[in-house]
């Protein structure tokens, strides 16, 4: 009799576990997790993309780089390894959209300051003006947290190629072969260095959308273990 009840109890546990798994699976099908698109050059406004890569339809990732930040430190992809990050292009003497964009970056910084998975990266489009000293002065004025946000400079060709061939985020200046027409784009990059979103950095509602999408990326692909089984 004891052996019968033990078998019955075991069977009841197994059926209970299977029921939970089945219900969870049905819920997942009926309520799929939100995901973000993966952007390639062919999916972006051609004005923002260097012609040499406009045909590329997939497998686009942000290439390795080496730049100098507001503290004179060399910043590379290693500083953003396994991080979600927001990138943009600006210049410290800009009097039009840059102050708004920077203020909105400050807002984002305040929201992710305690989030170890997220960082910020701002590239100057006037490296001949924005020296390390100038970037540091600007960073102090704006309240930049050095541990979360790098303001970076480099040679003009490097910045141009990053904007046009990597982040797909700036128009070419027809009056200057290596010049850029500054845009308001904030670019969301995932941990695999893929572009997952573009946002108007001057609009509050777009900043809200960006913050939401950061949450989506953090939850994307996470696995939950349940009694030795994995549910995606």
Image (cartoon, rainbow, N blue to C red):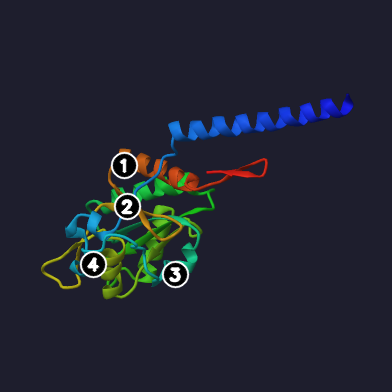
- Distance from label 2 to label 4 (Cα)? 20 Å
Pointer 3 or 4: first along the chain:
4
Q: Nearer the viewer, mark 2 or mark 4?
A: 4
Q: Nearer the viewer, mark 3 or mark 4?
A: 4
Where is residue 46 drawn, in percent x and y? 18, 58
Task: Name the residue that disc number 4 marks.
Answer: 53
Q: Would residue 1 be found to the left or right of residue 69 on screen?
A: right
Task: Name the residue that disc number 1 marks.
Answer: 206
Q: Quadrant of the N terminus?
A: top right
Q: Residues within 10 Å of mark 4 (few under 14, many from 20)?
A: some
User: Height in image: 32 above or below 67?
Assistant: above
- Distance from label 1 to label 3 (Cα)? 27 Å
Where is residue 193 drawn, in percent x and y? 41, 61
Q: Mark 2–mark 1 contact, CB under 8 Å?
A: yes
Count the numbered circles shown.
Answer: 4
Q: Nearer the viewer, mark 1 or mark 4?
A: 4
Tell me the number on the disc at residue 54: none
Q: Residues within 10 Å of mark 3 (few under 14, many from 20)?
A: some
Task: Name the residue that disc number 2 marks.
Answer: 186
Pointer 1 or 4: first along the chain:
4
- Label 4 residue SS: helix
- Distance from label 2 to label 1 (Cα)? 9 Å
Q: Mark 1–mark 3 contact, CB under 8 Å?
A: no
Pointer 1 or 3: first along the chain:
3
- Label 1 residue SS: helix
Pointer 2 or 4: first along the chain:
4
Q: Would residue 28 be found to the left or right of residue 210 on screen?
A: right
Where is residue 222 drawn, in percent x and y? 53, 47
Task: Name the residue that disc number 3 marks.
Answer: 75
Q: Mark 3–mark 4 contact, CB under 8 Å?
A: no
Q: What residue do we see at 41% from left, 40% from top?
A: 34
């Amino acid at each position: 009799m004891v052996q019968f009840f033990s078998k019955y109890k075991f069977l009841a546990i197994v059926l209970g576990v299977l029921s939970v798994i089945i219900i969870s699976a049905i819920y997942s099908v009926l309520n799929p997790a939100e995901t973000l698109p993966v952007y390639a050059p062919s999916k972006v406004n051609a004005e923002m993309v260097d012609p040499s890569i406009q045909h590329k339809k997939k497998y686009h990732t942000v290439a390795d780089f080496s730049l100098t930040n507001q503290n004179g430190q060399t910043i590379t992809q290693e500083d953003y390894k396994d991080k979600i990050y927001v990138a943009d292009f600006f210049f410290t003497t800009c009097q039009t959209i840059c102050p708004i964009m920077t203020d909105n970056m400050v807002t984002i910084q305040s929201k992710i300051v305690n989030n170890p998975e997220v960082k910020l990266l701002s590239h100057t489009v006037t490296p001949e003006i924005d020296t390390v000293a100038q970037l540091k002065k600007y960073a102090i004025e704006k309240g930049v947290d050095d541990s979360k946000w790098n303001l970076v400079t480099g040679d003009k060709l490097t910045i141009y190629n990053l904007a046009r061939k990597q982040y797909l985020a700036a128009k070419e200046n027809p009056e200057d072969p290596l010049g850029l027409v500054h845009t308001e784009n904030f670019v969301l990059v995932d941990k695999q260095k893929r572009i997952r979103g573009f946002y108007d950095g001057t609009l509050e509602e777009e900043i809200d959308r960006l913050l939401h999408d950061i949450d989506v990326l953090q939850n994307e692909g996470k696995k939950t273990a349940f009694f030795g089984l994995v549910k995606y």
